[in-house]
Image (cartoon, rainbow, N blue to C red):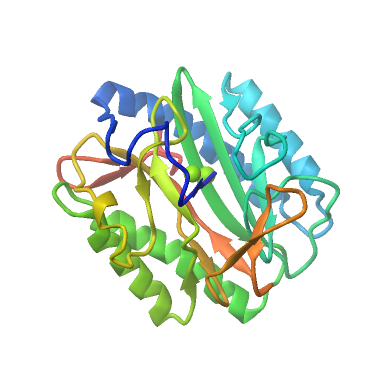
Amino acid sequence: MSKHRSDTIGGRQPCGGLVLKSAREIALMRKAGAVVYRVLDHMKEMAKPGAVTRDLNRRAEEIIAQAGATALFKGVVNPQARYPFPAALCISVNEEIVHGIPGDRALCEGDIVSIDCGVRLNGYCGDAAVTLAVGAVSAAARHLMDVTRQVLELAIREIAPGTSWSEIAGKMQRFVEENNLSVVRDFVGHGIGRKMHEDPKIPNFWDGRGRNEDFRLQEGMVLAIEPMVNLGSHLTRGTADSWTVTTRDGEPSAHFEHTVAVTRDGADVLTDGRS
Ligand code: MG
Ligand code: MG
C-alpha cells in the first residue's frame, strides 16, 4: 500500500522521526517479508483468466493466518476514503494504479493485475507488490510491466549509505521516461518497520520541488520502494469506491514493490523469498 504524496506520516515532519533498525529487527522484518513473498508467489498461480479477485484475497488471508501473521491493509483508514480498507490485498486491474478492492471481478485474458500485500509478523512489517500478466498480454502491456520491474531493480542497485534519495529518484524517473512511460507522482513509497508507513516518503521521481524532503541513505534504514508506472500520462483519478486510484487517461498502469534494508555496502531485499 502506497502513501498519498501529501499525507503526513505519523503526524510528523518528513524525516523528523526516522527509525533506524538493528540487525535483529531486520531479521524479523525478513520473516514478515517471507510471508508476503509466499502470498505473492501463490497469486502468480491464481491470476489466470476467469479467476475472481475476491478468491485471490481469500487465499491470501488463509496464507497470512496460517503463518501467524496479520494483514496490514485490512482496516486501514485514509483521509480520501469513506470506510476502512476491507481486504488483505490491494488488487488493481489495468488502468487501476493502486488500492483496488477485491470483489466479484473476474480476470480476463490480456489483463494486467497489480497485487499488493503487507503483513505484520512478531511486531514487524513487510510490504511488496507485483504486476502479473493474465494469459497473453499486448506488447505495450509487457513493456510497461518489464520497465516497472526494471526501475525497481535499478533503485535497489543504486542504494548505498551516503547517497541522496533524490539522485536515485531522478535516475528512476529518467529510466521510465526514456522508455516512453511516465512515473506516478501522487503516490510514493515509505519507510517501514513496526508500522507500515514510517518516515521518510520515498518518491519515484524528482522534480526538485521536494528538496526539503530529500534525505541521505543510512545503514539500518528500511524502505518500501514502490514505483507506479503508467503507459500514458502520470495523472491519476479517484473513483466512486473512494479507494481505487486509476489513471486519468484510462491507460494501464503497473506497480512493483520490495521492502529493502540499507546495509553497510548496499541493499538487502527482505521480500524476495530468502529466509
Ligand atoms: Mg505495498
Ligand atoms: Mg507500500
Residue 248 vertical position relative to residue 264 in the rendered view, above or below:
below
**In percent of the image, x 60 and y 79: which residue is there?**
140
Measured as percent of width and height from the top left, residue 147 is found at: 46, 70
* Vertical order, 189 against 27 (above or below): below
Foreground pick, 198 / 21: 198
Q: In this view, does 240 lie above or below 75?
A: below
Foreground residue among 68 and 241: 241
In the drawing, does residue 190 fall left or right of residue 253?
A: left
Q: In which quarter of the image is the C terminus?
A: top left
Which residue is painted at 37% across and 50% down in the image? 202
Q: Residue 258 location in percent, x, y?
A: 43, 47
Q: In this view, does 16 lie to the left or right of 231?
A: left
Where's residue 106, x and y in %?
83, 55
Q: In which quarter of the image is residue 145?
A: bottom right
Choose between 232 and 158: the one closer to the eye.
232
Query: Which of the 4 quarters of the picture holds residue 231?
Result: bottom right
Q: Does 25 sit left or right of 54 as displayed?
A: left
Q: Is residue 261 left or right of residue 218?
A: right
From the image, which quarter does the N terminus lie in? top right
Residue shown at 42% from the left, 73% from the top: 176
Q: How many labels does the image show?
A: 0
- The part of the image, by quadrant, that contains residue 177 is bottom left
